[in-house]
Amino acid sequence: VEIMIPFVRTLDMAREVNEVLEKNGLKRGEDGLKVQMMAELPSNVFLADEFLEYFDGFSIGSNDLTQLTLGLDRDSGLVAQYFDERNPAVMKGLETLIKAAKAKGKYVGICGQGPSDHPDLAKWLMEQGIDSVSLNPDSVIPSYMFLGEK
């Protein structure tokens, strides 16, 4: 069994969520229980190594991470044109999260629109060593074909 915890803002929250789970009979590591964290906040990037002390890996929420890194709302007509997971600041955050997880031998995947919209981003993520990439159903075959090219 694996549990995914979203929006873990601080290290105190990371500790507390594990305490709450344990009080309710769900102890991380016991009977194979893994507790994963959605990495979707700049604080998760800055403290990636520290958060991994409390979790068994990351699922990167690229939509929220992009919005919060760039300080914009992708649904706002005023700034939506600046939403792009390939922005260098966002990619630096993605790289930091992937490297931190890999260095500790932990899982790291990504969910969000980016890899579906930008096959070049999906390829870059694979080159960084990401374990899994979620895709929209309509982009699975085109992405697979693109990623399989040499």
Image (tube, helix red, strand yellow):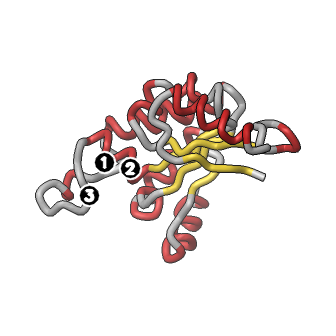
| Residue shown at 39% from the left, 44% from the top | 65
Query: Which residue occupies the extreme right position in the image?
Result: 31
Query: Label 3 sits on what residue type?
Result: Arg
Q: Is residue 82 left or right of residue 148?
A: left
Which SS class for mark 2? helix
The residue positioned 31% from the left and 39% from the top of the image is 69
Q: Which residue is mark 1?
A: 67
Give how far apart the Cα atoms at labels 2 and 1 are: 5 Å
Question: Tag 3, which secondary structure?
Answer: loop
Q: Residues within 10 Å of mark 1 (few under 14, many from 20)?
A: many
Closer to us: 55 or 66 = 55
Three-letter amino acid code of the residue under disc 2: Asp
Q: Is residue 34 left or right of residue 112?
A: right
Which mark is on residue 74? 3
Do residues under tags 2 and 1 come within 8 Å of each other at their CB atoms? yes
Q: N-terminal of the two: label 3 or label 2? A: 2
How far is mark 3 from mark 2, CA to CA?
Answer: 9 Å
- Left or right: where 79 falls relative to 46: left
Where residue 42 sits: x, y (%)? Answer: 38, 34
How far is mark 1 from mark 3, CA to CA?
7 Å
Relative to residue 80, is residue 11 depicted above or below? Answer: above
Where on the picture, by quarter, is residue 54? Answer: top right
Residue 64 marker: 2
- As shown in the figure, which amino acid type bears the numbered disc 1? Gln
Q: Is 20 in front, or is 99?
A: 20
